[in-house]
Image (tube, rainbow, N blue to C red):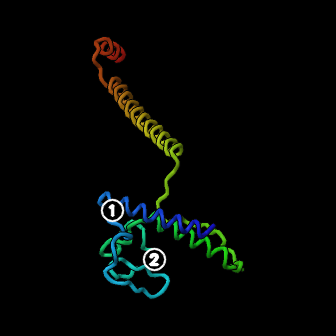
Amino acid sequence: MIPLLTVLLQLFDLLSAQLESSMGMQSNLDAPPKQLPQCSGEWQWPCRNGECIARYDVCDGIPQCSDGSDEWNCENWRARQNQYDGGLQGNVNRPVPTTQATPTTGAPEDSSTWLPTKEEFLILAAFAVLAVLIVMVIRRRARAKVLARNRRGNLLQADSDEDDILISSMYS
C-alpha cells in the first residue's frame, strides 16, 4: 500500500510540476539545483540554490530561501511530510508521560477586561437615570428657593392702599 502511495505521489508531483511550468510558473521539480545542497542535521532543509534553512520555515508563507524555493509545491511537500510523520508514529513506541499538565487559572494576557453587552447597557442606563434624578433635585431646590424669596418679598412690600389704611387705622 505504501509503495503504491509513494508512486502516486511522485506521479502527482511530476504532473503538477509540468502543469505549473506550462502555465509559466517555476517549480522546484523542473529546475535543476545550482549545486548539490548539503545540509547537516535532519532539522534543516536544502534550498534549490544551495542554502540551508530550518525545516519549520518550509511552506510557512514567507520565502526564507533567496530563490523562494521553500514555498514551491507546498501541498505535495505537506502530503509527503504527513506520510513520513505517520510512518514514524507507527514505528516508534513513545513512553507515557509521568506528569500531567495541570490547567492554570489566572489573569488573561490582556489586562483590560470587557463586560458583556447586557451589563454595559445596564450600567449605562443606571448612570443615565442617576444623572436625570440629580438634575431634577437641583432644579426643584432652585425653584423652591425662588418661590421662598418671592413670598418673603411680598410680605415686606406694602403696595396696596388697603394695607396702608388698615395699618394707619390701628394706630389712630
Q: Which mark is residue 57?
A: none
Above or below, comparing residue 44 to residue 158 in the picture: below
Closer to the camera: disc 1 or disc 2?
Answer: 1
Q: Residue, x 37% and y 84% (percent of image)?
A: 36
Query: Pointer 1: what residue?
Result: 21
Rendering coords of residue 145 (x, y %) = 38, 33
- Camera-side residue: 61 or 107? 61
Residue 124 is left or right of residue 64, and the answer is right
Rendering coords of residue 85 (x, y %) = 58, 72
Q: In this view of the protein, can residue 163 be seen by the observer?
A: yes
User: Do tag 1 and tag 2 residues touch (Cβ < 8 Å)?
Assistant: no
- Camera-side residue: 96 or 169? 96
Q: Residue, x 55% and y 69% (percent of image)?
A: 6
Q: Residue, x 63% and y 66% (percent of image)?
A: 1
Q: Secondary structure at mark 2?
A: helix
Rendering coords of residue 118 (x, y %) = 53, 43
**Amino acid type shown at disc 2:** Arg
Rendered image quadrant of residue 67:
bottom left
Rendered image quadrant of residue 25:
bottom left
- Camera-side residue: 60 or 138? 60
Query: Pointer 2: what residue?
Result: 55
* The residue positioned farthest toward the bottom in the image shown: 40
Give the CA separation, mark 1 to mark 2. 25 Å
